[in-house]
Amino acid sequence: MRFLLTCEHGSNAIPARYKPLFRNQAAVLNSHRGYDIGAREIWRAFQKKPAGKYSGDLSILQPDLSCMGSTSRLLVDLNRSAHNPALFSEYTRHADRTTKDEILKKYYYTYRNPITEWVQARIAAGHTVLHIAIHSFTPIWQGRRRSTDIGLLYDPARSLEKQWALQWQQALQIALPALCVRRNDPYRGVADGLPTFLRRAAGRAYVGLEVEINQRFYLSDRKTFNQLLKILPATLPLHLLAQIQSR
């Protein structure tokens, strides 16, 4: 088994060449629209070598490949397929074709293509690939407070993904009983995203899950957020690795 860890929306940076497209938009770039608040920190936590009470067997699940996007989703959304109308935001959608093609070449394809090629090469070599993509979501959407604290997104038609999400959910509920952990909420796991694309590109030897964390923890409850940095990696259902490795 090979382990892929990604974070598509961990940065809100805009390269200098495109900053004129975002003039006076600092507040937007620093909001949940500009990036997934707190996702970068969680992505980093999965790469740390476990210590103390959280050590156990986690050392066997260090990422073989770890990638994070380097620009804001408002420049180009790395978690959308190239045909998706939301690939470009309202700030870049009306740029000329040359500018758009340049953005795609420099930032979109240079992120997604190496990941896709890496996954396909590992599968061609006989491995199964486990992919965990780290994301976060705004606590209030369209004026309503979201009740989900942690969402685990997957394709319910894929038995390994379903089993992995269910057992991870159960472990998280035991470790953090006060939190609401849901599957395929606040988004559907089969919606357009990098894991959905990789399922089609790589076939059944690919196992992909997206982790969605409520941004309220990073913004207003750092004690719980710091717990999540340790508990999310620590509760991975590692006993399922044998099933993944045997396929």
Image: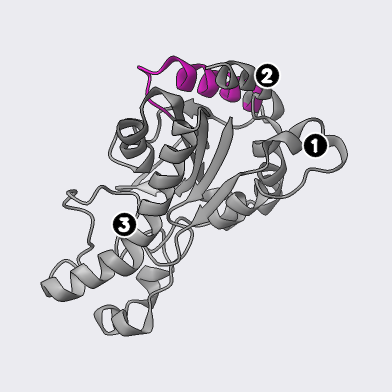
Pointer 3 residue:
77
Of residues 125 and 90, the one nearer the viewer is: 125
Q: Which of marks 1 and 2 is nearer the N terminus?
A: 1
At numbered mark 3, what does the secondary structure look like: helix, strand or loop? loop
Kind of residue at disc 1: Tyr
Report x, y in % for residue 136: 47, 48
The disc placed on residue 239 is: 2
Q: In which quarter of the image is residue 51?
A: top right
How far separated are the C-alphas under marks 1 and 2?
A: 16 Å
Q: Earlier in the sequence, mark 3 or mark 2?
A: 3
Of residues 19 and 206, the one nearer the viewer is: 206
Q: In this view, does 155 lie above or below 71?
A: above
Q: In this view, does 119 lie above or below 217?
A: above
Of residues 88 and 238, the one nearer the viewer is: 238
Left or right position of 151 against 233:
left
Kind of residue at disc 3: Asp
How far separated are the C-alphas under marks 3 and 2?
A: 34 Å
Q: Is-magenta flag for residue 27?
A: no
Report x, y in % for residue 111: 40, 58
Question: From which residue to which does the magenta span run?
Answer: 154-172
Residue at x 59% of width, y 49% of height: 217
Left or right position of 64 against 31:
right
Q: Can residue 148 be seen in this view?
A: no
At numbered mark 1, what does the secondary structure look like: helix, strand or loop? helix
Task: Answer few, some or many: residues within 10 Å of disc 3's Cα (few below 14, many 20 plus, some between 14 and 19).
Answer: many
Kindly indicate whether the residue at mark 3 contacts the one at mark 1 (C-beta within 8 angstroms).
no
Pointer 1 residue:
54
Report x, y in % for residue 212: 48, 41
Kind of residue at disc 2: His
Report x, y in % for residue 99: 19, 75
How far separated are the C-alphas under marks 1 and 3?
A: 34 Å
At numbered mark 2, what does the secondary structure look like: helix, strand or loop? helix
